[in-house]
Image: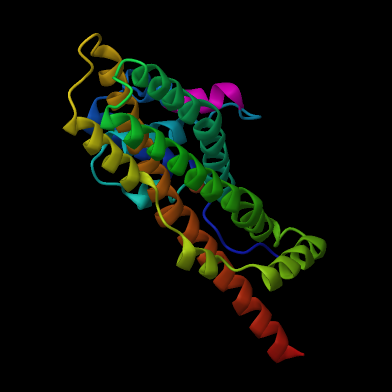
């Protein structure tokens, strides 16, 4: 297939204006955001090949800071950059966030009586939640993201296009959307459950640390879900629609 499917690339002027607006409105350098270390941890473990896109980083931190997510803020960035963020975030959740929370639950559990009802809630939550989140991430890593990679590259050459057509036969983004559920609500539930019980009398700090880790993870998952549902998926669906249009036009010509 000749030519590229139309998509928005990073246009210096547009991205620069966004960054200026961001600094004007929020008077916030990325390094000063309380979310900066958290966001950077995923890039430190798996550094991007050509450095971090500073405009993307500023826009991302704005999304963490703001109450309302604005998908249009990410229009200027290529799909590959969004996919890269999503992949790094999955690694960060599985290898950093979940083990940290597991450790806190383990330490906190040791401070309550063996019969205390909070223990059952904590253990059940962790096993169920870990299993669900891991499954959720595996589905995206093994099916959705490889399919979107092929879709993104399909205008590059006839071979890439053929590879996408093969994938299209077996997988659909629309099908993924139907079965997709976000996971941050369950974190809020467990946080509310923990809040119903008093901290252990011997040491309240672990209790507070766990609550803060959960709240922080909730925020991260919320941005992640918005990024998938309102940026990644709509753009992938639009690209898929354009490819379909080309296929239909080609079929009519033949
Ligand atoms: Fe995800």
Image quadrant containing the N terminus: bottom right
Residue range in magenta is 39-47
- Quarter of the image where the C terminus is located: bottom right
Q: Is residue 10 visible?
A: no
92 and 235: which one is in front?
A: 92
* Residue 199 screen position, x and y as percent: 21, 20
In the picture, residue 105 is in which quadrant?
A: top left
Image point (23%, 41%), residue name: 67
Position of residue 8 measured from the top left corner of the image (x, y, whole percent): 51, 54
Residue 43 belongs to magenta span: yes
Seen as rendered, the residue at the extreme right is 159
234 vs 120, left or right, is: right
Front one among 199 and 76: 199
Can residue 228 be seen? Answer: yes
Measuring 46% from the left and 60% from the top, which residue is drawn there? Answer: 180
Q: Is residue 243 above or below residue 47?
A: below
Q: Is residue 209 above or below residue 181?
A: above
What residue is shown at x 66% (from left), y 62% (from top)? 4
In this rendering, would 201 be left or right of 22? left
Residue appearing at x 54%, y 28% in the figure: 52
């Amino acid at each position: 297939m000749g030519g590229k499917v139309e998509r928005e690339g990073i246009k210096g002027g547009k991205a620069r204006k966004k960054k200026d607006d961001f600094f004007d409105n929020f008077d916030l350098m990325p390094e000063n955001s309380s979310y900066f270390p958290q966001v950077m941890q995923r890039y430190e473990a798996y550094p991007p090949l050509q450095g971090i896109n500073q405009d993307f980083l500023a826009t991302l931190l704005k999304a963490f800071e703001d109450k309302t997510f604005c998908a249009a803020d990410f229009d200027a960035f290529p799909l590959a950059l969004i996919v890269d963020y999503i992949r790094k975030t999955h690694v960060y959740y599985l290898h950093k966030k979940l083990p940290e929370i597991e450790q806190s639950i383990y330490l906190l559990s040791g401070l309550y009586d063996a019969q205390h009802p909070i223990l059952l809630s904590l253990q059940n939550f962790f096993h169920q939640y870990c299993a669900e989140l891991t499954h959720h991430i595996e589905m995206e890593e093994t099916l959705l993201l490889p399919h979107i990679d092929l879709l993104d590259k399909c205008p590059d050459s006839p071979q890439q296009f053929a590879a996408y057509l093969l994938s299209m036969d077996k997988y659909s983004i629309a099908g993924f959307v139907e079965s997709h559920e976000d996971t941050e609500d369950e974190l809020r539930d467990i946080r509310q459950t923990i809040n119903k019980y008093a901290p252990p009398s011997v040491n309240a700090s672990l209790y507070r640390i766990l609550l803060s880790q959960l709240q922080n993870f909730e925020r991260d998952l919320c941005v992640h879900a918005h990024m998938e549902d309102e940026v990644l998926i709509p753009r992938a669906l639009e690209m898929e629609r354009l490819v379909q249009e080309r296929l239909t036009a080609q079929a009519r010509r033949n």
